[in-house]
Amino acid sequence: MSTNALFNTLLRPAVLHILRAAGFHSAKSSVVDTLVDLTARYLLLLASHTAQNAYVGHNESTPSITDVRLAMQQCGLLTPALTASEEIWKEMLRRPLEEYDEDTGARAKEAKRRDAEDTEDVTTFIDWIKGDYNKEIGRIAGTVKPLPTATEALDAVEMEDYLNTLMKKHSKTGVDARFQGTVLGHPADPRPVKIEGGPVDSIQEWCRKTRERAAKLASSADNQEQSNNVIDTTEQPGDVVMENQ
């Protein structure tokens, strides 16, 4: 399975859970594949814009929260209330904070109100994330545990997310044993790779012998160059000037 196919397969259950939370109970396979592809393309676009903002802003591969927020605005995930030009004009025309009375608390209230206006789109997005719709998605996926009733508390039924449930279903010897060394399990311990049918037994030994061979060739080339310089200095010139003959 290729990398793209693996990631699309892991993304497919999440898309199905979102559709189920939205009220869909069935769909054609082609429709689901299209939605999964669109979701993957959008996530790739968001990550690409974030990385580009990080390189342009501070020449680093690790993005900051500002880079992520700007990428979300560029991809239409966050919609600011004002355009960039409107924000500039508003900043130029509104009353400076220094003119508000600090003793009465008017300056602090005005600063708080301006911060709320500047982060209104982020606040709206956070409220949507914490809303009932996403709670329903988490409930269907098994990632959000609802408050247990008295009977459920007595039964002590523990809910698991869909991924762990599928992994345990297809693993007879245990999750860690079967999926170790894959993207779904713990990293595997490094093992030496043996080479059969060659003069060496492992890649490490082959690298060591290659470095030794390269060092010998470099040393022999230096010795040859030094010997050539010695020969050149001992040779007499071909033309002899005869004076007073």
Image (cartoon, rainbow, N blue to C red):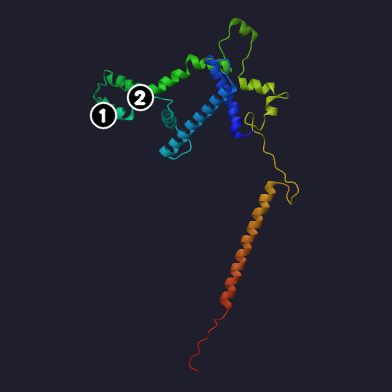
Q: Residue at coordinates 61% horizontally, 20% vertically from top-left?
A: 162
Q: In which quarter of the image is residue 16?
A: top right
Q: Circle 1 — which element?
A: helix
Which labelled disc corresponds to residue 138? none
Given the current orientation, which residue lies at the most extreme right position?
197
Horizontal side, residue 20 vs residue 58: left or right: right
Mark 2, residues whose alpha carbon is within 10 Å: few (<14), some, or many (≥20)?
some
The quadrant of the rendering that contains the N terminus is top right
Residue 149: x and y, percent? 58, 6
Residue 139: x and y, percent? 56, 15
Q: Residue at coordinates 48% horizontally, 32% vertically from top-left?
A: 45
Amino acid on which the number 1 mark rests in the picture: Met
Q: Residue under circle 2?
A: 118
Q: Is residue 208 above or below residue 173?
A: below
Residue 44: x and y, percent? 51, 32
Q: Is residue 221 above or below residue 171?
A: below
Q: Distance between the residues labelled 1 and 2?
A: 15 Å
Q: Circle 2 — which element?
A: helix
Horizontal side, residue 210 vs residue 85: left or right: right
Horizontal side, residue 154 vs residue 84: left or right: right
Q: Residue under circle 1?
A: 92
Q: In which quarter of the image is residue 126?
A: top left
Q: Residue at coordinates 65% horizontally, 8% vertically from top-left?
A: 155
Amino acid on which the number 2 mark rests in the picture: Asp
Instruction: Work out whether residue 124 or residue 191 is closer to the camera in this orientation and state it.
Output: 124
Given the current orientation, which residue lies at the most extreme left position?
99
Q: How many marks?
A: 2
